[in-house]
Image (cartoon, rainbow, N blue to C red):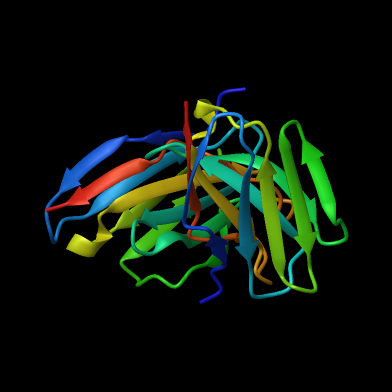
Amino acid sequence: SQQGEEDPQALSIQEGENATMNCSYKTSINNLQWYRQNSGRGLVHLILIRSNEREKHSGRLRVTLDTSKKSSSLLITASRAADTASYFCANSGGSNYKLTFGKGTLLTVNP
Amino acid sequence: KAGVTQTPRYLIKTRGQQVTLSCSPISGHRSVSWYQQTPGQGLQFLFEYFSETQRNKGNFPGRFSGRQFSNSRSEMNVSTLELGDSALYLCASSDGTGNEKLFFGSGTQLSVL
């Protein structure tokens, strides 16, 4: 399977804490993306990092990419209860016009 | 701009029946992708269409098919439904220029009884 893996599968933290999720993938990539999904709904794109970038920021989000280790991490700072959701990484997996998603990390932020 | 619209939102079918799901992309987007999401397998790519042509296809049996119309709207069809086809079916649109970000609809929750 081309599917990547997120780690951890589930994460529970308190409001105000930082949350870090990791993602590994198996093939070469053009870019790596992170998406968020609230329970049973569609996915929302959060951030895209290209293969020649090492770090990217967007608001409270920070993404890193290590192509030598085929891994990425998503950091959410100062988390809020509204950040409770599943987070997925996705990559092109060497195939055009297709994204391969990981299994996701379920983040619970307790008020 | 209106977002990606999927209809219906919920669907209940019995084994052996067929089902058609509809997706209207964001205005101006010419690429539509379909994904199946289940608790066990996660998000699995079904197929991608651009200007009425299928450009990529996932590893699903021939019972799963799709098409795209000249206005970029897309439909997917599942024939001879099986219990294992119960899933959230997600449609996503993009401008189709490459592996750029996708805009997802809210999905169709299909239950096969």
Query: What percent of the width, then of the height, locates residue A16?
Result: 61, 29
Q: State whether residue A95 appears in this view.
A: yes
Name the foreground residue: A23 vs A27.
A23
Q: Residue furthest right?
A: A52
Q: Tell me: B39 left or right of B16.
A: right
Q: Is residue B81 visible?
A: no
> In the picture, residue B86 is in which quadrant?
bottom left
Is A72 drawn above or below residue A83 in the view shown? Answer: below
Residue drawn 69% across and 72% down? A94
Q: Nearer the viewer, residue B69 or B77?
A: B77
Q: From the viewer's perspective, tell me whether residue A69 is left or right of residue A78.
A: right
- Image spot of residue B62 (x, y percent): 35, 71
Residue at 67% from the left image edge and 49% from the top image edge: A74
Q: Residue furthest top?
A: B1
Name the one closer to the observer, A105 or B60: A105
Q: Residue at x 80, y 40 (%)?
A: A57
How many numbered marks are there? 0
Percent x, y of residue B113 = 11, 53
Q: Which residue is painted at 54% across and 69% down in the image?
A: A3
Q: In the displayed structure, does residue A58 sit left or right of residue B8? A: right
Q: Is residue A57 placed above or below A31 in the rendered structure?
A: above
In the rendered image, residue B73, in percent from the top left (x then y), is placed at 50, 40
